[in-house]
Structures are given as structure tokens and as C-alpha cells.
Amino acid sequence: MSVVIIGGNECMVCQYEKICKKHGCKAKVFVKEKSGFRDRLGSPDLMILFTNTVSHKMVLSAVSEAKKNDIEVIRTHSSSASSLNNVLDEYFAAIEA
């Protein structure tokens, strides 16, 4: 399973990747929008938006790509490690149910 995380803190990128790996996911983390952002998204199974730390323009860009490619989007205000853990726990619990 692949996950794209958009937003968050630069110093937390490795921690985000470790949390996703613990849940059995491969993660790509985009903290800032750089050129070619849309092309580098790929086709993940899940997109997580940390709405507190991401620009409105980047959210619009990511959501439009998600709609085009039928990718599920989960928005969370906090970009903490515990918030990411909760999002992934809830997502996998919903899949198993």
C-alpha cells in the first residue's frame, strides 16, 4: 500500500515515513510544493493532507489530482506523529470492517 503525505514539518519527514512503514505502507512526503509536484505524486492508495501546514494552492492541486485518479483523501489539521498514527489506524480499521 502506498501513501502520499502532503504538508507537515520538514524535520518530521523521517518520522512520518517510519510510522507509515510500521503500518505496512510506503510513503512519499511532500512538505513544500516544488516544480513537477503533480507528476511526482504517482497513484497512491491514500492521500493524507495536513491542513495546518500546507498552502491552499497545494491543497487544491493535490485534491484535483486525487479526483482525477480516484484516490481517497483524508484531511487532518494536526501534523503530529500521533495524528498520523490515528489516521492510519482508523483507515485500516475501516478497511477491515
Image (tube, helix red, strand yellow):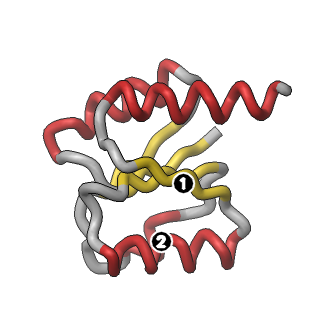
* Quadrant of the frame with the N terminus: top right
Locate residue 49 relative to residue 53 in the image: left or right. right
Mark 1 and mark 2 in contact (Cβ < 8 Å)?
yes
- Measured as percent of width and height from the top left, residue 4 is found at 48, 51
Q: Is residue 47 above or below residue 19?
A: below
Q: What amino acid is found at the position of numbered circle 1 in the picture?
A: Met
Q: Residue at x 60, y 54 (%)?
A: 44
- Measured as percent of width and height from the top left, residue 91 is found at 65, 35
Q: Is residue 10 above or below residue 66?
A: above
- The residue identified by callout 1 is 47
- Measured as percent of width and height from the top left, residue 26 is found at 52, 37
Image quarter of residue 13? top left
Image quarter of residue 96? top right
Q: What amino acid is found at the position of numbered circle 2 in the picture?
A: Ala
- The residue identified by callout 2 is 62
- Measured as percent of width and height from the top left, residue 45 is found at 66, 50
Q: Residue at x 33, y 80 (%)?
A: 57
Which type of secondary structure does the marked residue at label 2 adopt? helix
Q: Residue furthest front?
A: 77
